[in-house]
Image: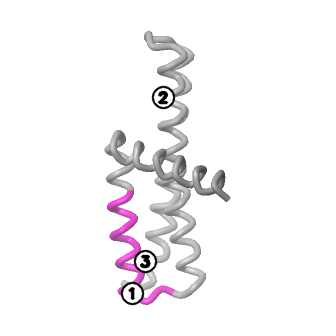
């Protein structure tokens, strides 16, 4: 049980680190909070809640993965490198695709209320 508790502490430390170091994660978190408050106010149905929470989780998880990969790349090769640059750009593209897809889904769901 102690090992499980320690695992959660390390995971929370990781989320705290991303929050502290990544402005995009903070922006995405604030947007997520605004979406959740709006969904509550608009009385979303259960399927809408599931979709919205899934999208929020995907965006935040993508940002965490992006941060981990970028930090690993910086550790492996601190100098400018074309392959490392390609990896970082690809990860940025990954986050952008998840964000845009989630935004489109959000607009589709929210448009039913306006």
Provide residue 8's location: percent of width, then percent of height.
Answer: 56, 54
Q: Nearer the viewer, residue 31 or 75?
A: 75
Quadrant assignment for the C terminus: bottom left
Q: Are marks 2 and 3 in contact (CB under 8 Å)?
A: no
The residues tagged by marks 1 and 2 sit, at their Cα atoms, a distance apart of: 39 Å
Q: Name the residue rendered at 57%, 85% in the picture.
A: 46
Report the residue marked by disc 1: 42
Q: Residues within 10 Å of mark 1 (few under 14, many from 20)?
A: few
Q: Is residue 105 visible?
A: yes
Q: Is residue 17 left or right of residue 102?
A: left
Q: Nearer the viewer, mark 2 or mark 3?
A: 2
Quadrant assignment for the N terminus: bottom right
Q: Are marks 1 and 3 in contact (CB under 8 Å)?
A: yes
State the mark number for residue 110: 3
Q: Nearer the viewer, residue 21 or 30?
A: 21
Report the residue marked by disc 2: 71
């Amino acid at each position: 049980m102690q090992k499980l508790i320690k695992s959660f502490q390390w995971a929370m430390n990781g989320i705290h680190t991303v929050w502290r170091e990544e402005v995009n994660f903070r922006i995405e978190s604030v947007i997520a909070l605004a979406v959740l408050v709006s969904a509550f106010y608009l009385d979303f149905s259960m399927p809408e809640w599931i979709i919205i929470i899934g999208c929020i989780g995907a965006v935040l998880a993508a940002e965490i993965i992006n941060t981990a990969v970028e930090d690993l790349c910086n550790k492996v090769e601190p100098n400018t490198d074309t392959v490392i640059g390609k990896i970082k750009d690809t990860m940025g593209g990954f986050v952008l695709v998840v964000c845009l897809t989630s935004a489109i889904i959000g607009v589709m769901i929210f448009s039913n209320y306006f």
